[in-house]
Image: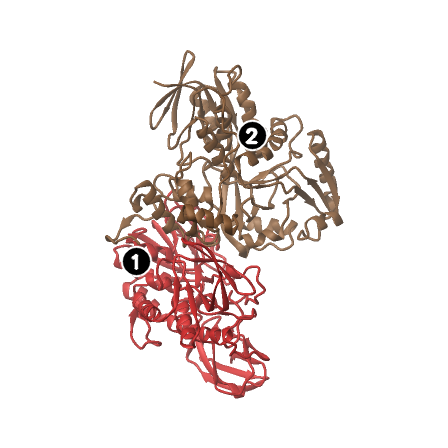
Chain colours: A red, B brown
Amino acid sequence: MTKRYDVVVIGGGPAGMAAALSAFEKGAKVLIVERDVRLGGILNQCIHNGFGLHYIGEELTGPEYADRFVKLVESKHIDVMLESMVLRLTADRKVEILCPQGYVTVEAGAVVLAMGCRERTAGAIAVPGTRPAGVYTAGMAQKLCNMKGYLVGKKVVILGSGDIGLIMARRMTLEGAEVELVLELMPYSSGLKRNIVQCLNDYDIPIKYAHTITRLVGSPRLTGLYYAPVDENRNPILEQEQYVECDTLLLSVGLIPENDLLNGLDVEMSPITSGAVVDQNRMTSLEGVFSCGNVLHVHDLVDNVSREAEIAGASAADYAMGALKSGDTISVKAVDGVRYALPQRIAKGNEGKVDVYFRVGDVYKGKRIVVEVDGKEVYSRKTLILAPGEMEKITLTRADITGDVTVRLV
Amino acid sequence: MKIYDCIVIGGGVVGTAVLDRLARYDIATLLLEKDDDVSVGATRANSGIVHAGYDCKPGTLKAKFNVRGNQLMWPLVEELDVPHLKCGSLVVADESGRDGIDELYNKGVANGVDVEVFDGVKTHEFEPNLSDSIKWSLYAKEAGIVSPYQLCIALADRACLNGAEIRLEEEVVALAQDGALWTVTTNGGEYKAKTVVNCAGAFGADVNDMAGAEHYDTTFRKGEYYVLDNTERQNIQTVIFPLPTSAGKGILVAPTADGNVIYGPTSSLCDEGDVAVTLDGLADIRKNVAKTYRNPVVRKCIRTYAGVRTIIGDDFVIGKSKVVPNFVMAIGICSPGLSSAPAIAEYVEGLVCEGKTQKENCVTTMPRVNRLSEVDGDTLNALIKEDEAWGRIVCRCEKVSEAEIVRAIHSPLPAKTVDAVKRRVRAGMGRCQGGFCATRVMEILSRELDLPITEIRKGRSGSNIALYSVKEVPND
């Protein structure tokens, strides 16, 4: 017989666990489907500290942060399937799962997508040159180093300044490798300021902004690479090409929400976030399917993931138990320097408040964040500096949201 | 010392196709490959196209072997259970290209190829995403696509099942003939053979020189490619060529047998073995694809690669040496080499095996294997009952189970590296490019081959993935 759950959460990382817990608190029967052998997701390989300052009020390592949630999940009547991968999700919320016990189908009153993201690869950005051993995503090197105990190389260049790349610059240094250089295509980092300071500056690791790789050299193992500054169109200026010897290149050039499961389903997707378009409950355009964490949009801090997942989990439970009313929605638009704002839709209503998260598309100094409803300003805040690496939050009063919302920088 | 009836030098698709043919005879055969796996030269880095044979100059070896090779290819890939699709090909041209299309049509007819000229309306009906400027095309229904490396590997596997030997990482360094016997010296040992077949690809002319056979000058031309995500596959039905030029068949847009789409190849002179992708080459592809295809989506790129064509004069060099006895050459096999390989093998079989008898009970049809990405739910449950490794996904992008990886590691020609596994079962070939699964594949290789992780290689010797052990940690 096919099993039925009120809420099936796909993914047992920080988003999945927080969603499952909040759904459970609402009284739902919950299943977490996790493809790894343990819960925790990518947090398990993030052994550095800095997690939980906002959400828990303590500074924890990734595994510690995950463990807080694992213990809570284990203490509740929440079913967990490990080594289990969802191969297919149907529009009527049948979840087809492959696991070492068999290929099973579970029916879900509501589904929470919490599959996280994957790293953009050297192939995806078409790095020129040879294709040797020694070229890895920062996350793969992190997993090998922190979970398996192997160092991929000893003379390292890092392309991209995403947070995992910055963290790995420090990590590889602490394990005895030399990190020669970090190259960043953009004139600014896509990572957190604190990681630039604590992972690069503190270890005298140089970062060159507006630079990229022009050619990898070496076969079968990487022996070095050429790099050059880029012009305003981000094309390399080859006359200024330089060479650096290295045996390893780590890539930290972007994270992509892993929404492959939605291929073939009629779910409205955002071309900016590569995640689903959601309302304030984190429900997608497909009834009863919710999304949260890095599969919805790539977050800066896990604390924000947990908060978002709580909303998605609780709403999914409400939906499954018939307590979620859907009605007319208004849209939230991002313009004038705001790259995206989320949720993209908000249901009309008078009570309470709603948080809107957004990211900017460049580094901005002295700008004012302005929210307009039908052209009328309802929120304004002055900022010193805004950077693409940091997520911003504004809290709006529902009663103010009488029409379409626009978030902009002035 | 064992005396082989025949030693084949080179484990590309030509060498393995030859070996596969010879292995059916009651003779001792050996293939020597200098690299860590078969298929890792030009065979792994080309367009994967089975050409119909309309654009080869009539009367050439290229024309003869391509047309015959195409006929042999489709039943061969069925026998070997190799991914393929006979999707046809279109050579497309704008208004000014009508003469060029006619010229190709006439060559096709002269070569005995089934070709048809389409006008603009029919062309666009057939392939809706072509550029608006396209007004004519030449359609060849016998053309299609195969997975070139999987074909080569399947040929090698079948040859092994039929008793042939394959020695990897053995580079031929000397060839000497004493009376009726060849002595083939490699970095690993010495082998005796009555006949030597030179299928050494890029090194074909070098092997000829070692044997004292005909000397040839070789040039090399690099072809670079983009590989696109499999979500792009639905937008293209057939292999799309521009009109060919003297430099080659031009930059095509084609589906791959594994479900991706490729843009390429370029054609630029290069040194042997130079498979580096270049900024110029990639720019050249982007510029040229836009001429035939309406919506190039380079942002869907998951990988780039380059391969090298080995060119000796204007034609293939195939046949017995006229200088030294018992030495057969199949060299200078540039495009359409993949398409021609089955026919070249058939021809070489005739030269080597004349008067020999075929073995009884040879493996002809390879046993069908299950692929997680293809089986239905009931079959999957039956498989998991037998072996729970079928229930463990390793490569999530391409949906490859642990069971398939273990099978590849213990196949007739075993996969010993991460790339060898990838070529056989596609683990790591998807959009995350092994970011998630490479560590799992390394662990499975380590377990199955009883090797430490630091000795697990990407491919050839020296391509170790993790160089050092940080500290002792327990495995999962």
The percent coordinates of residue A392 (x first, y second) are: 44, 76
Asked if both marks, 1 and 2, belong to the same chain, the answer given is no
Outermost left residue: B472
Q: Nearer the viewer, residue A378 or A31?
A: A31
Badge 2 crowding class, 10 Å Cα cut-off, few under 14, some 14 to 19, many 20 or more, is many
Q: Amino acid at mark 1?
A: Asn
Relative height, residue B421 to residue A264 (above, below): above
Quadrant of the image for the C terminus of chain B? bottom left
Which residue lies at the image location 34% right of the left edge and 57% below the top edge? Answer: A143
Q: Position of residue B458 (x, y in %)?
A: 38, 44
User: Position of A79 compared to B367: left or right?
Assistant: left
Q: Secondary structure at mark 2?
A: helix
Q: Is residue A223 visible?
A: no
Q: x and y percent of residue B111 in the render?
A: 68, 29
Question: Label 2 near label 1: C-beta < 8 Å?
Answer: no
Q: Looking at this view, is B79 or B263 the one in front?
A: B79
Cα–Cα span, label 1 and label 2:
49 Å
Instruction: Say if A351 sits above or below A42 in the image.
Output: below
Relative placement, left or right, of B267 versus A309 is: right
Q: Tag on residue A230?
A: none
Image quadrant assignment for residue A304: bottom left
Q: Chain of mark 2?
A: B
Residue at (56, 27) in percent of width and height: B344
Mark 1 neighbour class, 10 Å CA radius: few under 14, some 14 to 19, many 20 or more: many
Q: Position of residue B191 (x, y in %)?
A: 37, 21
Foreground of the two, A339 or B348 = B348
Residue situated furthest front in the rendering: A1
Extreme residue toward the top, this view: B179
Horizontal relation, residue B189 to residue B327: left or right: left
Q: Which residue is mark 2?
A: B342
- Which of the labelled discs sits on residue A146, or is there none? 1
Which three-letter amino acid code belongs to the residue tagged 2? Pro
